[in-house]
Image (cartoon, rainbow, N blue to C red):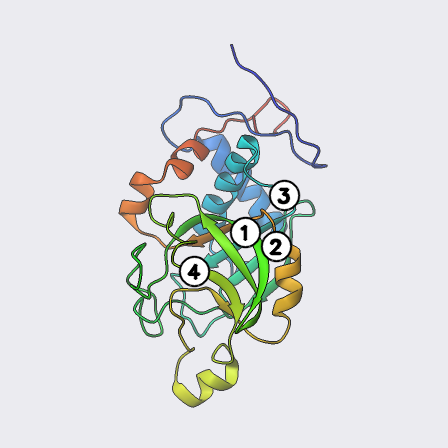
Amino acid sequence: MRSFFTYSFTFFILIFFTSGKCSSPELKEFTHKKYAELNQPEISYDAFHNATIGYYYLLKKGTLKNTRYLSIIDMSKSANKERYYLIDMKENKLVYQSLIAHGKNTGEEYAKHFSNIENSYQTSIGFYTTAETYTGKNGLSMRMDGLEYCNDKARKRDIVVHNADYVSPQYIKENGRLGRSFGCPALPIKGYEKIIEKIKNGSCFYIYYPDRKYFQKSSIIKLGEKAQLTENGQLL
């Protein structure tokens, strides 16, 4: 017997997950519709689709405490491009877009290598929840908790969101590419505090990369792909 859980967003009934094995045509149609309404073609549809189904899966589980915002980083794009996207899920609206750094051993301009190992200085892909803030050597910073096999050591590795002076158009101009971190998703100095204030304390944070092994192993993606639609076109 199916059980239903209702969430109070203006345009959604919370997702119920069935025993299907892949994204249904209806689910793809649904995320295509939300993507079209968002009207931000610079965001990859694949990144948006996977981030969205993962977000609603985590919402159903009660994992998300800050339910309004979804962060997406598209690691398939050049680090010289603004590849961090902050989406207001209540309004289905892009509210911020920015440069963001990857780990120094993940690649030069393009991210190629990812790791969950301490001292690897590499980025870890997959779903996270944002956590508490603190003031450190980089000023206001925000811890994150990895939710998957490929990033569950994030807290132990001190993977946090912080600012960095090497995340800037000027650094790109002088060096040919964006600067790199020790594995943290580092933001530009200007405006980063407002972003942390929005997304801290339990929002969904997704680092996307089109890695076949990840999609085969990610339980969040697999369970998210089992969503179906109700007769009135909502997810269940």
- Considering only vertical position in the picture, is 42 above or below 225? below
Amino acid carrying label 4: it is Asp
Q: Which mark is residue 168?
A: none
Badge 1 element: strand
- Residue 11's spot in the image, x, y percent? 69, 36
Q: Which mark is residue 158?
A: 4
Instruction: Identify residue for label 1.
Output: 130
Badge 3 element: loop
- Residue 110's spot in the image, x, y percent? 34, 69
Labels 4 & 3 near each other (Cβ < 8 A):
no
Q: Nearer the viewer, residue 135 or 221?
A: 135
Labels 1 & 2 near each other (Cβ < 8 A):
yes
Instruction: Identify residue for label 3.
Output: 67
**What residue appears at the point 53 percent right and 41 percent down from the top-left corner?**
55
How far apart marks 4 and 3 lie (CA) works out to: 24 Å
How far apart marks 1 and 2 lie (CA) works out to: 7 Å
Please tell me how crowded label 4 is: few (under 14), some (14-19), or many (20+) other residues with Cα within 10 Å: some
Amino acid carrying label 2: it is Ile
Q: Which mark is residue 199?
A: 2
How far apart marks 1 and 4 lie (CA) works out to: 13 Å
N-terminal of the pair, mark 3 or mark 1, is 3
N-terminal of the pair, mark 3 or mark 2, is 3
- Residue 46's spot in the image, x, y percent? 43, 49
Among the 4 quarters of the image, the one containing residue 90: top right
N-terminal of the pair, mark 1 or mark 4, is 1
Please tell me how crowded label 2 is: few (under 14), some (14-19), or many (20+) other residues with Cα within 10 Å: many
**What residue appears at the point 65 percent right and 48 percent down from the top-left corner?**
92
- Residue 29's spot in the image, x, y percent? 51, 37
N-terminal of the pair, mark 1 or mark 2, is 1
**What residue appears at the point 37 percent right and 31 percent down from the top-left corner?**
22
